[in-house]
Amino acid sequence: MFRLTTLAALPFLLLACGDKDDEACEDAALQCSGEVLQECVDGAWEESEDCAAADMICHDMGDDSHCMMDGEMEM
């Protein structure tokens, strides 16, 4: 009986453990997901730019998030 109850609750537990990427968002909002810059389009997060592909990092600053160079600049 315990196993049946545990199995029945499993889908609800998995839904409660969603990550940042699954949250609803406001259009034009920005965020970083790892090294990928994401933009909110129609209430869902979409990849905007792969910062790592351009040898950059994603700098998470809320709506000012952006890709930027990693490391010190040479002078």
Image: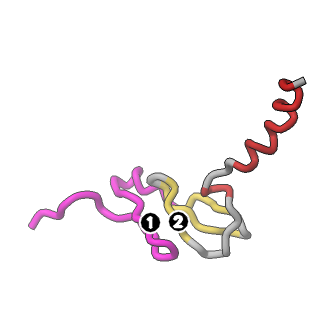
What residue did someone put label 2 on?
31
Q: Is residue 27 left or right of residue 2?
A: left
> In the rendered view of the protein, which quadrant contains the C terminus?
bottom left
Query: What is the quadrant of residue 44 in the picture?
Result: bottom right
Residue at (68, 61) in percent of width and height: 23
In 3D space, how far apart are the residues under numbered discs 2 and 1 (Cα atoms)? Answer: 6 Å
Label 2 packing within 10 angstroms: few (<14), some (14-19), many (20+): many
Residue at (75, 47) in percent of width and height: 15
- Disc 2, SS: strand
Q: Position of residue 32 (x, y in %)?
A: 49, 61
Q: Position of residue 72 (x, y in %)?
A: 18, 61
Q: Position of residue 57 (x, y in %)?
A: 37, 57
Asked whether 17 falls inside the magenta stretch, the response is no
Closer-to-camera residue (26/19):
19
Closer-to-camera residue (50/34):
34
Q: Position of residue 13 (x, y in %)?
A: 75, 43
Label 2 with label 1: CB-CB less than 8 Å: yes
Q: What kind of residue is marked 2?
A: Gln
- Disc 1, SS: loop
Residue at (44, 65) in percent of width and height: 60
Q: Residue furthest front?
A: 2
Q: What kind of residue is marked 1?
A: Asp
Query: What is the quadrant of residue 1 in the picture?
Result: top right
Could you say which disc has been placed on residue 60 in the image?
1
Up/down of 31 relative to 6, above or below: below
**Earlier residue among tags 2 and 1:** 2
Residue segment shown in magenta: 49-75
Q: Residue furthest left?
A: 75
Residue at (41, 50) in percent of width and height: 53
